[in-house]
Image: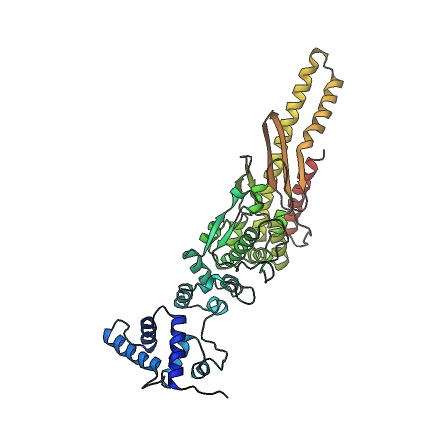
Amino acid sequence: MFEVKDSKQIGAYIKKLIYSKYPSQRQFCIEYIKKMGFDEADSEQIRRTTNKVNQIIKGDRATVQVNDLPFFCELLQVSCEQILSCGDCYRPIKNHITNYEVAFSRNPKEWEAYMNREDNLFLNYDEYGKSVVDYALEFKNYDFIKFLMENGHLEFADNSAMGNGISFGLKTDIKRRDIGKTDIWPIPNTYYEPDNLFYEEVLRTRVLALATEKKDFEMLEKLRARMNPAMYNINICGTFGDDLIRQRNEDLICKIAESEDDIIEYYSDEYEVKDRLNHTNRFIYPYLSEVIEIMIENGNKNVERVLEKSIIHNEYVFNCLSENLNTYMQMLITKADEECGDWITPELKKINRDIAIKNALCGFKYNSDEKIVSYYYGIKRGVIEGMVSNIISIKKTPKKEPIKELVEKLNDLANKIIELGKE
């Protein structure tokens, strides 16, 4: 139970609420007119409503009527108990939209109304540590994600100038409040990248998983779907840490593996990346091995095509590595033979060749976790050449033909590439 205050007290309390929520009493009246379904541009309607609200606030001759009370409660975002008791009695209300609700909604008008609020509520995380973007991804509300991108709340970010392991991502102006690390952080960042860069990459791959499911090729290209930020930090001189491993997104990998013709074709195409040393290197989707394994397990009919394209890629890597190794070996052999001059003998030639092979292999590196092969050699002081790429291999050989034969051929090429650097 609660005590209902007199009309003057209620009027004064309503006035206090109006000025805490609206810039002016007139603006409140206009919102009231809109809520009632009348013409907000009607000056006579505004005059009548203003007089009515003035009388309610003064409390001399009128108080808020039963018919008006629900509208006042909604516009002032309070319960009727709170108005009638002048704040002595509070009741929980549910008359404001939340991050959860707007992200679940499929109504563009509700999105616009929420995003255009003067208090910019959408920019904050809720009590569960989640933003409107987090909920949209959770609900797979792809249309809302695209709405956010079209309105500049989500956009591709090129962070390559920062020199971090995460060179691009999907940035957002929807931020957690800057109140330290004591509240909930939505993504556990256990690495050494700045939090915002780590979150941007996670956000990018989560949106890509949805775009892959929706077959939105324009979005895939915009967010560099086949790429990985770590690829820009890989060069002919070697690989860098476990960036490829930690930047993987299992949901995206599964979505690709479950896809059909055009999506699979897209993700299994080779592409080129210019590294920080200004060398152009050819790669294939860095998690294609895992994609193929899932496709085999699920019996995806497109797996043969992906295996064939992977074999072509491994053949390219083998030939490219062989060419670079042979080029440098011949350079070393020629130089050693010339230094021997007239004293050269078959025995010396063999020694020179053995030494050249050993020295030439010094520039070979293979990272078995990331499946990256790199090789470099110096032509002259300050000038280096070489190659770097990834290879595809499958852990388990299936029994069914022709998949079995294709997997064996693929793995055989991968093993030959690795052994080439050990000769």
Using the rendered view, name the quadrant where residue 63 is placed: bottom left
Visible residue check, residue 402: no
- In this orientation, which residue lies closer to the viewer: 103 or 227? 103
Seen from the viewer's position, the closer of residues 114 and 70 is 70
Q: Is residue 33 above or below residue 238?
A: below
Q: Is residue 224 left or right of residue 393?
A: left
Horizontal and vertical percent position of residue 383: 58, 27
Among all residues in the image, which is located at the extreme left?
44
- Evaluate whether residue 125 shows in this view: yes
- Foreground of the two, 144 or 120: 120
Based on the displayed image, in which of its 4 quarters is residue 62 positioned?
bottom left
Q: How is the image coloured?
A: rainbow
Q: Is residue 305 left or right of residue 143?
A: right
Q: Residue at x 62, y 31 (%)?
A: 324
Q: Is residue 318 above or below residue 94?
A: above
The x and y percentages for residue 162 are 53, 43
Q: Quadrant of residue 251?
A: bottom right
Looking at the image, the residue that sits furthest to the right is 347
Q: 362 or 43, which is in the foreground? A: 43
Q: Residue at position x 41%, y 75% from top?
A: 17
